[in-house]
Image (cartoon, helix red, strand yellow):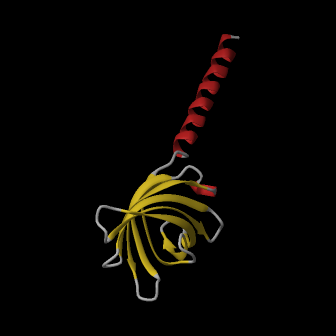
Amino acid sequence: MKRFISQRLFALVLSAVGVLALVDAARAVERPYASRGTAHFTSANAFVGAGTATYLGHYDEAGSVEFSPTADPTVLQLNAASTYTAANGDELHTVFTAHLNGLTGATTATVTYVGGTGRFTNATGTATLSAQLLPGGSIEVAVKGTIDY
């Protein structure tokens, strides 16, 4: 009887260790992230874009932005949110703060990843965004940072 209980206890402990190992393997991992694309405004505060990104492949983007003045009359503060949608439908949600130089059209931003859907449900991370307003109103965008999902 003691041997039977000992074998059951050993099997239970071994099963628990196996489950814990699987849970640890499923945790988010910090990974390098980069994207390149173009965007354009569809209204004074809404934009859409498309490009390619690590872990998303081709993506479509939709977002909104609020502009605020700064102490420098040639620079605007931007607070924005956007959603990247991968070809399979998974979404990556972002918020960012930026400065737009009205003289050069250059924008620099800090992007924060705040979840999404599918494999990005609990995504976190940060990145640096560089953008350039082009003649005709389109915007070239490059992002580089890290993401956990």
- Quadrant position of residue 100: bottom left
| Quarter of the figure that contains the N terminus | top right
| Placement of 2 over or under 103, stated as above or below | above
Residue under the point 54% across and 72% down: 57
| Placement of 7 over or under 135, stated as above or below | above
How many numbered badges does the structure rendering display?
A: 0
At which x and y percent is residue 12?
64, 25
Q: Nearer the viewer, residue 146 or 17?
A: 146
Q: Is residue 31 visible?
A: no
Residue under the point 55% across and 67% down: 63
Q: Is residue 57 visible?
A: yes
Residue pushed farthest top?
Answer: 2
- Quadrant position of residue 74: bottom left
Residue under the point 46% across and 84% down: 137
Q: Nearer the viewer, residue 112 or 2?
A: 112
Residue pushed farthest left?
Answer: 72
Residue pushed farthest bottom?
Answer: 136
At which x and y percent is residue 31?
43, 57
Q: Is residue 40 left or right of residue 101?
A: right
Residue under the point 60% across and 23% down: 10
At which x and y percent is residue 82?
54, 64
Q: Nearer the viewer, residue 20 or 67?
A: 67
At which x and y percent is residue 87?
62, 71
| Placement of 5 over or under 134, stated as above or below | above
Q: Is residue 62 left or right of residue 5?
A: left
